[in-house]
Amino acid sequence: MDDSTKQDGKTLDLLEKSATEQASSSSNSDCTENIEEFRKNLAQTLEAKSFYIPSFKIYGGVAGLYDYGPPGVKHFALEENMLEVDCPCLTPEVVLKASGHVEKFTDLMVKDEITGTCYRADHLLKDFCMEKLDNNKDLSVDKVQELKLVLAMLDDFSPEQLGSKIKEYGIVAPDTKNPLSDPYPFNLMFQTSIGPSGTIPGYMRPETAQGIFVNFKDLYYYNGNKLPFAAAQIGQAFRNEISPRQGLLRFREFTLAEIEHFVDPEDKSHPKFSEVVDLELLMFPREEQMPGKDTVKLRLGDAGTVNNETLGYFIGRVYLFLTLLGISKERLRFRQHCAHEMAHYAADCWDAEIKCSYGWMECVGIADRSAFDLRANSEKSGTPLVAHEKFSAPKEVEAMDEKEAMEVKAALESKGKVEFQVCTLEKAVTIKSNMVSISKEIKKEHQRVFTPSVIEPSLGIGRIIYFLFEHSFYTRPNKAGDEQLNVFRFLPVVAPTKCTVFPLVKDPELEAVARQISKSLTAAGIYNKYDDTGNTIGKRYARTDEVGVPFAITVDHTPTTVTIRERDSKDQIRVKVTEVVSVCKDLIDGVRTWEDIRRQYPSHPRMSPADE
Amino acid sequence: MDDSTKQDGKTLDLLEKSATEQASSSSNSDCTENIEEFRKNLAQTLEAKSFYIPSFKIYGGVAGLYDYGPPGVKHFALEENMLEVDCPCLTPEVVLKASGHVEKFTDLMVKDEITGTCYRADHLLKDFCMEKLDNNKDLSVDKVQELKLVLAMLDDFSPEQLGSKIKEYGIVAPDTKNPLSDPYPFNLMFQTSIGPSGTIPGYMRPETAQGIFVNFKDLYYYNGNKLPFAAAQIGQAFRNEISPRQGLLRFREFTLAEIEHFVDPEDKSHPKFSEVVDLELLMFPREEQMPGKDTVKLRLGDAGTVNNETLGYFIGRVYLFLTLLGISKERLRFRQHCAHEMAHYAADCWDAEIKCSYGWMECVGIADRSAFDLRANSEKSGTPLVAHEKFSAPKEVEAMDEKEAMEVKAALESKGKVEFQVCTLEKAVTIKSNMVSISKEIKKEHQRVFTPSVIEPSLGIGRIIYFLFEHSFYTRPNKAGDEQLNVFRFLPVVAPTKCTVFPLVKDPELEAVARQISKSLTAAGIYNKYDDTGNTIGKRYARTDEVGVPFAITVDHTPTTVTIRERDSKDQIRVKVTEVVSVCKDLIDGVRTWEDIRRQYPSHPRMSPADE
């Protein structure tokens, strides 16, 4: 005990010295003595503790690009204890070759042969079929069937198939009526080059996920070499759309939030699945997706077609997240991808689709991508991106299942060769009998080394915000009934401005009280707008409704009280000036509802016509 | 009154109908009846209220790029009631031509004539001079003077001057000793092209400010056509550095926060200047920046060289912001730009510089850029970016000051021509006598139309974070004294992880309590890490210190209490399990200090050696 006190005393002295140094104006505190060593030590610590990770480290890194690792950025998903990372948008080509984007992230394009204007081939064919179906009521039953089949097959057509349909239907450039070129693939990534020599080709990332895959090793280490764990990233993604349509739904630059949840492929259970098991939601499983069938309301625990618990858990979390923001439960469904829609390596995939004025639109994808991404980046970079399971006692293992091995042996002996499907190459490889020998060996292993599977919820933030706008927007008549007023019914949690503060009339005394309330709201972290324009109070209410502010505080001639008006019901209550901030805070934090508040405070009569 | 009640009744009915519609599963609520009209109305409202603004609208817009306007994004600077916007990184060339970046955003580069490797010319010359000064103690006084002069002039050298110095000193490529090319300008922007045709050249933005300037008209309207107001943007910026050095200080992609505060050029006072007037800070005015002189501690109100109150106000706010984060007051100074450093249009500019292991480094620039940016974008786009001041009564004005006009007239009559300096063209224009006539006219004007000035604080977030790492990092010996342990003294407000929770030993009961505390912290919004590794508590404390966690909670064998340990003092107190979350919350929110808490709760003896 004595010894320990002495030691601590020494440490404290040192700390005090350091504190004094910092306070003294001329000192450089911790970096005066040996700057190089200080900096080296700091840099080592920052990298060892994953504050920064050199970007694309497994590919040798790129000068001037660093990722912020888990402790260096604010938390994103506190509830899940996810590791958040923040990687650059600039991505060297090698990463996007590994992911397949350089080769396959394309849309089929046709060009106006005279002007060179570009169009998406499938859009032109779709428009043609839709227009025919809508405007030619006298089409034969066969023709209707044919056009509907084309629409259903649209996503699966090869360039040749698309081209021959465009020729067959005589489709021309919509703006000029000029003939069109044959369809050819156009890569949707924005290309640039990194560094002054122009020798490192790079792209603006088309998704944020790759930044997490290339950092897997550091993240796994940061998590104490344990599975499962999740990493998340919110950031910009870029897609050079051929002809962006649908206004706010198809951006060339947009915000994505992607979560990569890494699991042992042999155990995809989730400890919190029980928290979402009783949610009832609209689901659209693969086998229901045929003419005449529709979405079904299912208890998540009973949705047997969901491949595994972790996938199911994230479906539940996405449902809770979207409905909490204010997305209508009845206009939100989860649609399972059909086999032909999924990448060959994917185990299962569900899209959260939201019904809006464009129909049902995808806004979140939740996919079990198996081990594809980690394997692909392992191969290209030469850095194994694997997990280890230590056995408590060594286990005897065979490299190959005995039956399978015997079959291969028989084939090699009879045909002299055998074919293997190599998943990441996406092709079959032929192995000849002189390349291998097959023998039975049993090894003792102390650990299992495997590539984790990844479950990926990918949220299109811009789309979600747009759908929220659609689901929140309505109109109602003004008092005179001669005008429609626009209102956004944003929930307090998402409303960008929480309160407006109005002095009822231009009057220095009322204005002073109103300004003070606005200041106190700001101090409590409540974003508010003060409006002392001379407009009638009715006009000011209409203006605040139009930007979706849930609560309007009006300072009238009553000396110690103000009114609070709720946007959608237009109900008003009278509250003491001293209580107004705490009432608003409770409403915005969701501690109390407007109903709770209304019961507690006297109501104030609605606006009189004179106020308008 | 009767009438009003009836009206409201009708409105309520409508609202209820809408609510019912939303609840009914088959309905599409507000967009069933007339989808096109619904969408048009919504889109109009979203654009009219500046939720979205088509990106680069004043230049005709670019398909697929939209800005999020003020109400559409979370608040950034609540205190200042700033309008936050979120514009794309992809920027069409025309905007960056207007800003001057296409022409002038360059560094001078030299190439290894054999291998083609690129270097920054000024870096090579700087390295050469520094190395000579450091390692050749027998240099003549003249030579020393010459080298020091070169270092001082480095930023102002023309390509020719740089090239001749490189030749004169015989500087070669550092890696190969090969000869070097002449210096030539290299544009630091990452280039790409927008759209499939390759006809719209674009760049990744080198700063975020342009996004605000091009939206000035919408922002001014959103602010009720009133000055002053500020808009802010946080986002990625991109600079294709020739050869990034200084590790974490020079990124090719980094986060910038820029504020553009628009003011009337005739009134740059600031209503809140009084709040910062008494701050005392290290300043380095222009006239002090000569050999033998140093920074001076000045009261902001007495710093007469600061051009105007608004600029002074932001210097004060930046000081408060940086020191609140934990930047050392004694290693933070504000340095005024010398005349030759500033752009010709700038009225004044101050850099917040932080002392770190690389010396004094800029991390924030605070500039009065006058009307340059708005004028440049007005001219290129043809959209006037101006403000209006309505006069209460019409005023009589002359287009030109009478004395000045008479001088021009005299010059035209005597020499037949006169020269005008046109600010935005940055050149002189010759006007001949046959182009103009000069007469005296007095007009009545009802308003003043002018281009606002802009005061711009521009914060390099990545640099600030790095400096925070340096100012927070220190080492102290472990108990045995045979090892140095790393510590980050992050203030609770910036520490990425606020608490760690440890069960003292592997024990299901202790682990259950610890897990419950971790859960409750999470529920209170406190990011924490639970660590039940079997390591000694001493090792776990060291690990938590190394990532800068301010508070460690240990569950020991006492049934209803736990200990809380503060990172820097290593002091421990004993707190009831039921109080631990509220104590931590107060510490993290800054409601109570560690000193307050320590006085209130019994202290716990320091670790015994047995714990190590």
Image (cartoon, coloured by chain):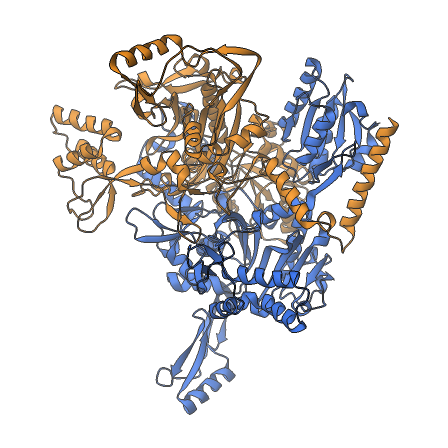
Chain colours: A orange, B blue
Outermost residue on the front side: it is A434
Residue A352 occupies quadrant: top left
Outermost residue on the top side: it is A403
Any part of residue B268 in sight: no
Comparing A546 with A281, the one in front is: A281
Depicted B527 relative to depicted B230: above or below: above
Depicted A140 relative to depicted B111: above or below: above
Q: Residue at x 65, y 65 (%)?
A: B306
Depicted B435 relative to depicted B467: above or below: below
Comparing A235 with B356, the one in front is: B356
Depicted B358 relative to depicted A104: above or below: below
Where does the N terminus of chain A fall, quadrant-wise? top right
Instruction: Provide residue A582's location: percent of width, then percent of height.
Output: 65, 35
Comparing B49 with A75, the one in front is: A75
Instruction: Provide residue A164's location: percent of width, then percent of height.
Output: 15, 34
Instruction: Provide residue A328's location: percent of width, then percent of height.
Output: 43, 27
Any part of residue A589 in sight: yes
